[in-house]
Image (tube, rainbow, N blue to C red):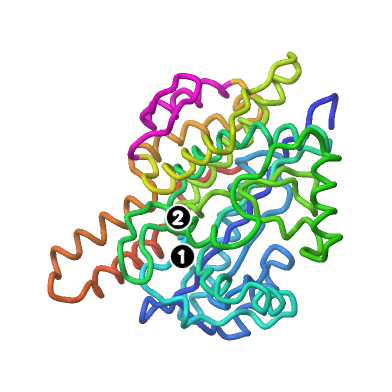
């Protein structure tokens, strides 16, 4: 901590699905040369994921959200460029519109083979991608305290990022079907509140000591203290198809973190709510995204999402100014106006169904993939840090 304040550094991880440009289906077995070239260009900033048809990128530690956003745009552009040479394209979407999970193979690395053996069909269904945002808080006790309070805001972050309304060729009726798939895994969802870092560590040690997990990296909660870095890692969000949407959500997350720290310096804190109540908003975000609002438990009523966003922007405006991400924070209004990736996918799918009513949805689904390819490589609005 510098001068008593956390660093509030930012790191972003994104997972992408790789699609065959001819069929628009998932590239279930990309050539190993593709990954080798990615590693040669990006080093440790690129990694395999559990499935062969996925790839992950991660930024270096950034001093600000604009810097992190620029890094993500550059990482995406490299993946796009290399994939093009192998007739593939990445899509930043949390599910593929029509490819089936049973047709995907997992990466043959010891870690993933162990997970496959342990989790069986549950993990083999994980044809899903997410975005994780790390914020630097190097004090263990403060990190746990902030995690407890930050849980309230996680449904808001999910609603702003939804990009998984389609699954295996059908509309699911959910804006984030990814979370339904993910929640089949153990040690997911909202974490408990912990009184201290010591209490948290005792719970981790209980699972490690019993041989259930090797370490805290196997806690896959919606938010967690990173086991590798001095950060609080937000994991609930879908991956944003537009990179500038990712920047806006990252800005909101880090600004709320700073707001919570600011309250603490005045001996104040955000009111704690039971997991039961927060889980209701989590479901509403998963089911409706931005469309039906979330419960404000202080007011005891459902508040429309546009009003919630305006409240959040005002709540953290001074934090955005201090962290040099006011423009990114105000970009939340663009998400409200235009909708998330899930909205656009549904609109494209339904419009193409009307044009091609007798094509068994195949043309409509491919049109959604084309849209995702184009939006994933749209870096407009990302300014130099």
Which residue is label 1 attached to?
91
Magenta residues?
291-317
Height in image: 381 above or below 87?
Answer: above
Vertical side of 126 occupied by 8: above or below? above
For residue 228, which quarter of the picture?
bottom right
Q: Residue at x 18, y 65 (%)?
A: 353
Which residue corresponds to mark 2? 241
- Residue 70 in the image: x percent, y percent? 59, 49
Q: Residue at x 45, y 80 (%)?
A: 87
Depth check: give the residue in front, 161 or 287.
287
The front one of 96 and 323 is: 96
**Numbered circles on residues, count:** 2
> In the image as oriented, which residue stretches furthest toward the top?
266
Give the residue drawn at x 75%, y 40%: 136
Q: Residues within 10 Å of mark 2 (few under 14, many from 20)?
A: many
Local secondary structure at mark 1: strand
Label 2 vs 1, first from the N-terminus: 1
For the N terminus, give its image quadrant: top right
Membership of 298 in magenta stretch = yes
Q: Which mark is residue 292?
A: none
| Residue at the spot 58% in from the left edge and 47% down from the top edge | 69
Q: Which sits in the foreground, 286 or 358?
A: 286
At numbered mark 2, what does the secondary structure look like: helix, strand or loop? loop
Q: Report x, y in % for residue 240.
A: 48, 52
- Residue 309 placed where, x, y %? 44, 29
Quadrant where the C terminus lies?
top right
**Disc 2, disc 1: CB below 8 Å?**
yes
The front one of 113 and 84 is: 113
Residue 196, image x and y in percent? 81, 35
How far, Cα to Cα, is label 2 from label 1?
A: 7 Å
Instruction: Decide whether residue 308 is among the magenta residues.
Output: yes
């Amino acid at each position: 901590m510098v001068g008593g304040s956390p660093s509030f550094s930012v790191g972003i991880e994104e997972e992408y699905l790789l699609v065959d440009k001819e069929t628009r289906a998932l590239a279930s077995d990309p050539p190993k040369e593709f990954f080798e070239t990615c590693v040669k260009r990006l080093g440790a900033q690129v990694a395999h994921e559990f499935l062969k048809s996925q790839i992950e990128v991660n930024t270096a530690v950034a001093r600000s959200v604009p810097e992190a956003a620029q890094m993500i745009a550059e990482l995406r552009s490299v993946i796009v460029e290399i994939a093009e040479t192998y007739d593939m394209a990445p899509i930043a979407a949390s599910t593929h519109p029509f490819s089936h999970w049973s047709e995907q193979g997992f990466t043959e690395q010891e870690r993933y083979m162990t997970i496959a053996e342990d989790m069986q069909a549950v993990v083999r269904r994980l044809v899903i991608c997410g975005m994780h945002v790390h914020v630097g808080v190097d004090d263990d006790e403060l990190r746990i305290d902030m995690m407890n309070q930050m849980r309230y805001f996680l449904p808001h972050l999910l609603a702003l990022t939804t990009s998984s309304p389609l699954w295996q060729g059908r509309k699911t009726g959910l804006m984030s079907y990814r979370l339904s798939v993910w929640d089949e895994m153990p040690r997911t969802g909202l974490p408990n509140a912990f009184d201290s870092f010591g209490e948290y560590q005792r719970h981790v040690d209980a699972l490690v000591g019993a041989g259930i997990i090797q370490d805290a990296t196997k806690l896959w909660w919606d938010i967690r203290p990173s086991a590798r870095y001095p950060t609080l890692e937000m994991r609930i969000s879908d991956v944003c198809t537009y990179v500038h949407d990712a920047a806006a959500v990252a800005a909101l997350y880090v600004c709320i973190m700073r707001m919570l720290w600011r309250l603490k310096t005045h001996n104040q804190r955000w009111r704690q709510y039971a997991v039961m109540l927060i889980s209701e908003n989590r479901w509403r975000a998963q089911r409706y995204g931005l469309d039906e609002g979330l419960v404000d438990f202080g007011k005891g009523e459902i508040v429309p999402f546009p009003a919630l966003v305006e409240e959040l922007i005002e709540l953290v405006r001074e934090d955005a100014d201090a962290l040099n991400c006011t423009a990114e924070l105000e970009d939340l209004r663009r998400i409200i106006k235009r909708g998330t990736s899930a909205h656009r996918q549904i609109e494209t799918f339904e419009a193409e169904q009307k044009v091609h009513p007798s094509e068994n949805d195949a043309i409509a689904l491919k049109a959604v993939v084309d849209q995702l390819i184009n939006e994933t490589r749209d870096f407009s609005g990302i300014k130099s840090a």
